[in-house]
Image (cartoon, rainbow, N blue to C red):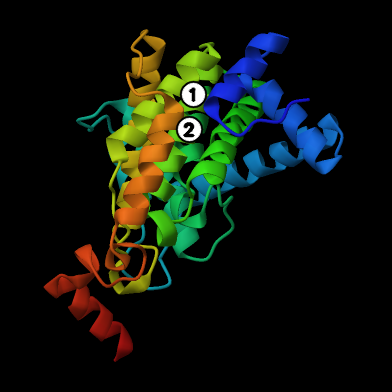
Amino acid sequence: MYQFSSGFELLELTKKYNIPISEVVINYEHEMTGDSKDTLIEKMASNLDVMRKSIERGLKEDVKSVGGFIGGDAKRLYDKIINNFTISGETVSKAVASAVAVSEVNAAMGKIVAAPTAGSSGVIPGALITIARKFGKSDDELIKSLFTSSGIGIIIAKNATLSGAEGGCQAEVGSASAMAAAALVELMGGSPEEALNAASFAIMNLLGLVCDPVAGLVEVPCVTRNAVGAANALICADLALSGMRSIIPFDDVVSAMDSVGKAMPCALKETAEGGLAKTATGIKLKMNMRE
């Protein structure tokens, strides 16, 4: 049996069967859905294809959002990278540009993979596809890492929430960043323990992040938060792969995120009644939309 509900149980399964997190998750999904492992891998390969296409569209086209607040920023950033004009370096900038690209395609009602949600859909493809390309990882390796990210998402969903409306943006971009960080560790040959350490760091760094979409649209500040989530995942994976341990275990971090989300006022949970949405400019933009 490959059932798990916590990081501790997931780690115990990797030790019991001497397999990585991705294989535990594939077996878990096989038990839960009845689909063959080949079918599950084919479905994940299809997700990867959508992720790649959304990045490509966002980087090449001047994508405009439905609300009109954002668009074309991924392409502008990518042009800076091509011209070797970035402060944070090529790798981080490419991951960020890719995350923004997917977020812009989402805001334009284009096709994306809502992993774990549409509002945080740029983080995982931005981080994973960039690093896989840099280090020459195969599609098979990349697909397995997506199952690792799924395992982290399953635990968060069971013990807290992935929804910004329930737990703030920490639950959306924070979870996506944790999922990406753990997947990056496995992709780069790290251990399951290191993967969970990376996931812990990622959530801790974004703990308490409110959800305050301007005019109620998944545009501002959602897109730039996807950029931060992708960069955070890269940094946290590096921390874990260097041997840095999370003093607070992953399960405790998820529990803290759940508590913080429940303590957060409703105005800061995707209602557009607080934070940036209630600034003078945020209100003005909302009023302009109505006219």
**Which image quadrant is residue 44 in?**
top right
Q: Which mark is residue 180?
A: 2
Q: Residue at x 56, y 37 (%)?
A: 155
Asked if residue 15 lies left or right of residue 199, the reply is right
Amino acid type of the residue that numbered disc 1 sits on in the rendered structure = Leu
Pick out the residue farthest to the bottom. 291
Question: How far across and how far down the image is residue 224, in percent?
Answer: 30, 50
Work out whether residue 221 or residue 60 is closer to the camera in this orientation and state it: 221
In the rendered view, tell whether residue 187 sits above or below residue 130: above
Binning the other alpha carbons within 10 Å of mark 2 as few (below 14), some (14 to 19) or many (20 upward) gives many
Instruction: Estimate how packed mark 1 is, as few (under 14), some (14 to 19) or many (20 or more) residues with alpha carbons within 10 Å.
Output: many
> Which three-letter amino acid code belongs to the residue tagged 2?
Ala
C-beta proximity under 8 Å, tags 1 and 2: yes
Residue nearer the viewer, 283 or 25: 25
Residue at horizontal 30 percent and vertical 55 percent from the top: 263
Q: Position of residue 85 (x, y in %)?
A: 22, 33
